Amino acid sequence: MAKLERVVKIYRSLAQIPAVAGAEIQSSNLINTSWSQRNLEKSAITKFSRTLVLNNLQCTESTPPVDITTETLSKVSNSQNLKAVLRDDNSKQFLEIWKLNKLIRVVDLAAADIHGNVFADIEFSSFEFSPDEGKVLYVAEKKLRKSEPFYKRKKPEEPQSDGYSGNTASKGQEFLYEQDWGEQLAGKKRSVLVEYDIESDSLKILNGVPDNICVAQPKYSPDGSYIIGVAYSTIPRKLGLIYCSNRPSTLFQLDFEGKYLELDLENTAVKSPIFTPNGNQVVWLERATGGPHLTCMRLVKTNVPLTRDSKTEVIVDIVQSERKLSPSNKTFYGIYNTGFPKRPWANHNQLFINTNQKYTINSYLINIDSGDIEELECDSGSQLILDVKDDLVVAVRRNFFVPDYLVVGKLPKAGSITSIEWIEITEKINVPEVQSATFKYFDLVAPGGDETAEFNAIYLGPASGEPNQVPLVLWPHGGPHVAFANYFFLEEALFLALGYAIVCVNYRGSIGFGENSVNYLLGKVGTVDVQDCIQAVDHTLKECPWINPDQLALCGGSHGGFIVTHISGQYPDKFKCCVTRNPVIDIASMSVSSDIPDWCYIEAGYSYTQKDEIDNHILLKMRELSPIVHAHKVKVPTLLQIGSKDLRVPSHQGVEYYCRLKANGVKVKMNLYDDNHSLGSVPNEMDNVINTVLWIEDALKGESSIHNIK
């Protein structure tokens, strides 16, 4: 039990490390920061704020942490005289308005009863003061019209109206089905724009949005005369939205007379529209609909107000493979983020963005007039710009061994931004568990001579050692169209603290390496991604002779789980154990049960449609590409970590795999969590992570005494 206690002790220590959630520049000498941290005692995430006091860009003092966990959304007005807060208190939502040093308005939104819950997710939400600071704009769930059975006895005094537009309650509509927006957006079906008038203390739903449109990310125009935002089409159906940048959408404009206008964009998906500083143009990110769920985006602009003849102009186009930046000659692989910092503008119409690039997240400054791009150098890992005000910039930096810390710099009045002198304003947290480890970037080329052959992997672990002494965990990411980047994450640190090495693989299909690399994987899942992972392991064994080739483990979730379950069947003697979280096991069966059925078709190499006759050849191809066809060859002990509420990769995928392995005499165990795809709640994450470590420890080191495996 001593080993088990050590694992739990290390986990508890790592769980106390906070992550930056945001930073807002209040003045040249005040920065308000927000952080999040796992709270094991409360089984929840705790959020807190700290205000940093600067003198000549040096942090001279900071306020003690203040718990802001109940603040779901917050916004400070431009004048800084007002602050709006959306607060969750015992599952009820309250809208608060603070003025200077006191609370002046509180609205119980449930009691107001004009809409459902306010949206606070990254896809839909907005929380904006009007330019005159008299109103607050947000997005909420449309209130459902009441329904009742065909027969219901009523009291004589019971009113016949439900208060919904003056109409009586409809009969026999209680069980009418309407799709929501899927995984982690469950229950969100129809959005409405809501405006709160601070002076009159009143709420108003803005009219004019068509019934077949869900609005998202709205913003006031600089003069306050209209609103722009994203309009999602709900026809022919809603598909899972989170982590999916390919959903049909466009830019909308709505004035306060109810006049609604959409930009005529065909087969386009739109994200994160923002006004330019002069208010004459709006800028956003877009890509084609369909295809991979995440891929390269283009940066686009148009003049406003919108008209039916509005024309768009591309500022930065989709990068197919790579682009050389002038005059630095640095390599740029395109834009892969779907949003901007809250205040992203520097002088002279220059826009800050953060985006994946190979194995890091980098920051760039883009001139939206010329399209010129300049990279902000960071040689210590990944960097994200958080806020810009006047000539002051605040960013967060992080790497595998150094958790989040904040830096500030001043923009030069003229010349290159590479001359910015960055100054640390928060302390770097020392993590003794990983101090002896190192990381290496591996730039790899797949054999065979394909035009798209480059990919990369990241080694984490000891820098040296005696031959054949260190166990290795192969860890492919999910998606598949995301990427590992150089930033601190708890699981990696826990394995390193226990003496393991890890190889994280950005196989072909990952983002940050050009559009061609993303598209190359389509129709080749289960082959190309598997081969790239095996090549990364073999390369690691060659470069790091201290790795023990007889102590190799597999670990991955979602599409990463798809890969490791493939590997355990295709290479049954190479690895000693497998842990997988919510893996895709059978693409064909997932195609009729997931919130993203289009994923199943696209990754199999086909277009998605529900029209016309079912093509059984497509279903057969999906099955042939799936790990389930290799399940009978699996030998290694396998642990499945499954979310019972997973809408993305429904739990029957893991259950089927569990039953097949058990039927074939494989040592297998499954944990079933009351959670969604990410298993992100604090108690479930803790159980998932620690059980993962214990399973691998037992399989590689034979220390069954540390954990009772049933």
Image: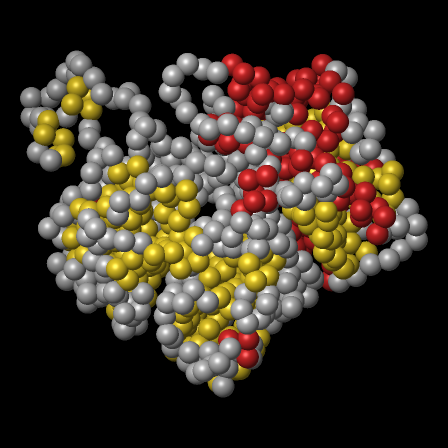
Quadrant in the rendering for residue 140: top left
- Tell me the quadrant of the picture where the C terminus can be found: top right
Residue at position x 72%, y 14% in the image: 663
Residue that sits furthest to the bottom in the current view: 56
Quadrant in the rendering for residue 414: bottom left
Work out whether residue 21 or residue 229 is closer to the camera in this orientation and state it.
229
At which x and y percent is residue 670?
65, 27
Residue at position x 56%, y 44% in the image: 516
At which x and y percent is residue 165?
11, 35
Work out whether residue 497 or residue 388 is closer to the camera in this orientation and state it.
388
Residue that sits furthest to the right in the current view: 466
Quadrant in the rendering for residue 144: top left
Residue 509 visible in the shown view: yes
Q: What number of labels is visible?
A: 0
Residue at position x 40%, y 53% in the image: 285
Residue 141 visible in the shown view: no
Residue at position x 47%, y 36% in the image: 291
In the rendered structure, the answer to whether residue 652 lies left or right of residue 368 reads right
At which x and y percent is residue 128?
28, 59
In the rendered structure, the answer to whether residue 67 lies left or right of residue 658 reads left
At which x and y percent is residue 336?
50, 52
Q: How is the image coloured?
A: secondary structure
- Tell me the quadrant of the picture where the N terminus can be found: top right
